[in-house]
Image (spheres, grey):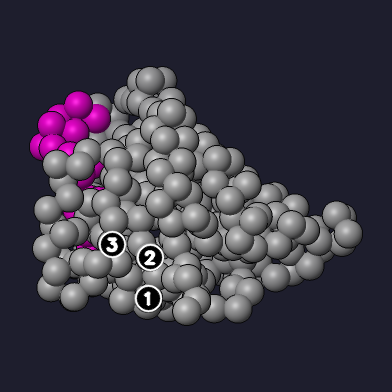
Amino acid sequence: MTTPKTVLITGTSSGIGLATAIAAARAGWTTVATMRDLSKAENLLEAAAEHGVTDRIQVKRLDVVDPASIASCLDEVIAEHGRLDALVNNAGAGQFGTVELTSLDDFRNAMEVNYFGVVAATRAALPHLRAAQGRVITVTSVGGVVGQPFNEAYCAAKFAVEGFMESLAPVAATVGVDVTVIEPGAVASDFIANVGLDVPALLAAAGPYAPALEAYIARTRDIFTNAQTPAEAVTAIIDALTGDHPPFRVQTSDWARDFAATTLADLDGSAVQTLTNTWVR
């Protein structure tokens, strides 16, 4: 019998991460679903039971800002399963506000979780992915290609992730590892709630920025009324996980493609990858 492929997914307690773990298990993968706080695993375990994939999902603790946690988790995966075929970098945290009203610590924290966490997990996983001729799939955002008002810290981190992965992709390809970034638009998930916005307090503290902030919040609420579900967004992730040589850049909806196209003419990343691959071969 062929040994099932193994995927490790970060940030699976809710939203896209949870839906990805269920979908990967349903696709037949041994799925290591990780999260920083294991007390939040209940929803994932209930969904696994509902879909009949409990035997293919293993929940482990992994904190992307703690290199020791990453190393320990990967050691366990290799000891228990003997291989790692894919890493899905999904863990992330929102950061809302404009620079004059946001502390430098808030900016650093956003970079730590959304960027350095991705770098750390990818760096630790690559030796195992090389051995398996596997792939790295990273959930970024359309906010990684189009900067958005009152999201300076978050978008800066996502732009950094996009630059890191676009630069890594041709190098990783020389050792048999595919790299893909997934760019969701608005997704109806707990991510928005997890940002913990107190809108009246934000407006009261916004000073001269209050009119712009009020307009932005109204526009954003309208967009999220018609947002994708996590399950719909996950289709692109599973295609990248299971397909042959997926493109570098994938948007998760027509809206996301149209939005990204305001900056990107090379929507799937093939033109950039064709160019930079010639630099390393």
Quadrant of the drawing holding the C terminus: bottom right
Q: Closer to the camera, 125 or 214?
A: 125
Q: Which amino acid type is marked by label 1?
A: Gly
Report helix, strand or loop for mark 1: loop
Q: Position of residue 36 (x, y in %)?
A: 28, 39
Which of the 4 quarters of the picture holds residue 106?
Answer: top left
Residue interval drawn in magenta: 186-206
Q: Position of residue 115 (x, y in %)?
A: 49, 39
Q: Nearer the viewer, residue 218 or 236?
A: 236
Quadrant for residue 206, please give it.
top left
Amino acid type, callout 3:
Ile
Task: Report whether 221 appears left or right of 31.
Answer: left
Above or below, 51 relative to 217: below
Q: Is residue 150 visible?
A: no
Q: Are marks 2 and 3 in contact (CB under 8 Å)?
A: no
Q: Quadrant of residue 223?
A: bottom left
Neighbourhood count class around disc 1 (C-alpha, 10 Å): few under 14, some 14–19, many 20 upward:
few
Residue drawn at x 19%, y 33% is: 202
Q: Residues within 10 Å of mark 3 (few under 14, many from 20)?
A: many
Please tell me which residue is depicted at 70% across the width and 62% down the height of the picture.
Answer: 176
- Mark 2 lies on a secondary structure that is strand
205 in magenta: yes
Residue marked by disc 3 = 57
Q: Which mark is residue 218?
A: none
Residue 161 located within the stretch drawn in magenta: no
Q: CA distance from mark 3 to mark 1?
A: 10 Å
Query: Percent x, y for residue 67?
Result: 46, 30
Mark 2 highlights which residue?
30
- For the point 63% across and 74% down, the residue is 245
Q: Residue at x 20, y 42 (%)?
A: 38
